[in-house]
Image (spheres, rainbow, N blue to C red):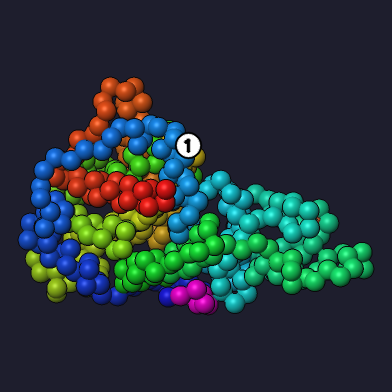
Amino acid sequence: MNDSRTPVVRNEPAEGGSPTAGMLALAERIAAGGGSGRHDEVQHIRHVPASVYTDPAHWAREKTALFDRMPQVIAPSALLPGPGMAVPHDATGRPLLVTRDRQGKVHVFLNVCRHRGTRLVEGTEVQCAGRLVCPYHAWTYRLDGALIALPRPDTFPELDKNDFGLVELPSRETGGLIWFSPAEEADFTHAEALGEDFDALGMAEHVLYRRRTHRVAGNWKLIMDAFLESYHVTRLHSQTIGAFFKDGITAGDLIGPHQRSAVGRAEDLIDPAAMDMAAMRRHITFAYQLLPATVIVPSPDYFNILVLMPRSESETVVEDFMLIPEEPQTDKARAHWEKSWNLLDGGVFAAEDFRAAELGQQGLSSGAITQLSLGTLETGIHRFHETLEGILRASN
Ligand code: FES
Ligand SMILES: [Fe+2]
């Protein structure tokens, strides 16, 4: 799927395809009993300095090298399911406007009028609109950013409307995700590569069920860490989803700098090669930890997409989107999805994973320990921090 697609009306249930070669390879490793990382890796205790979570100067370096520079996910495609839709987006700290134009192409703009800099679209909700009219003097833009009209054009002699389109940032839609880059030079190669797995999972054909913004009083990496190891799953989540998983039956690999992991569910896994995607998802939960800070969790029959937007070294805004295969048609279907939403968003994420991140921040900011220790079920965390360190080093 690429950025020129025209979305269709999403009334067909999403089916997905066959697992990709990479997914199958992880499934084979799970079937063989799992491992705690790449099998070529020496297994020993690793460490991460506590200061990377607590030092404001470290956060400033991360902001410059990662969040002000790298391609990053902003939302699932399902947030703007049809042509002629727009949504203001402020949580990255920039006033952004995400649109899908009449041709179905996604754009990410600065939500700022080119006349005198007024915020163009107010609020935070998705709007269906053929055009965007500035509230101040009614300069009018198309959803592809073009300035198409202004009142009293005779008072702007020599103004060429072509020079006054909305300021656009690089963006790409692939695999059911909308990516953008705050920097002009943007390389979406790895986003495209990830799109192959998400296409295989049928993510782009799913519809948005719910979205919710969480404010977590913890460093963004403490949240990522919780999605990079399976050590906690049967413990922190013992009251929610822990019983669905086998303890420590896990495998992981990399797609570019991004991580893909697989955790064995409680059912026995016999022959991954003989499985279609639906069967595979009943036996294994895949998860994707995308740089800089997005987590994709495909449960057996729905998706959660967590977009982390750090505001400081100790505060993170997380937007959780839940995607389902089709619009619920019955009360029974609605009750089913509501239960899943409450279990994951409110239970597993907010009350358990995000809570653990907050407790981590409280503990680490005391200065009681100078480094965190990672066992062999937590190598994904070490790999993530090594990748970040490499990017920070290269940007200095
Ligand atoms: S500031 Fe937008 S029309 Fe004047
Ligand atoms: Fe968790």
Residue occupied by mark 1 = 312
Who's the residue at 44% across and 33% down the image? 56
The answer to whether 149 is drawn above or below residue 383 in the figure is below
Q: Quadrant of ligand 1?
A: bottom right
Who's the residue at 57% across and 62% down the image? 169
Quadrant housing residue 350: top left
Give yes or no for residue 201 being in the magenta stretch: no
Q: Quadrant of the N terminus?
A: bottom left
**Residue 235: percent from the left, percent from the top?**
20, 38
User: Visible in this render: residue 379?
Assistant: yes
Amino acid tagged 1? Ser
The span picked out in magenta is 2-8
Residue at far front of view: 396
Toward the viewer: 295 or 160? Answer: 160
How would you classify the magenta stretch by its main secondary structure?
A: loop
- Count of marks, rendered view: 1
Q: Quick check: 235 left or right of 135?
A: left
Toward the viewer: 55 or 142? Answer: 55
The answer to whether 384 is drawn above or below residue 194 in the figure is above
| Element assignment for label 1 | strand
Toward the viewer: 19 or 49? Answer: 49
Residue at far left of view: 32
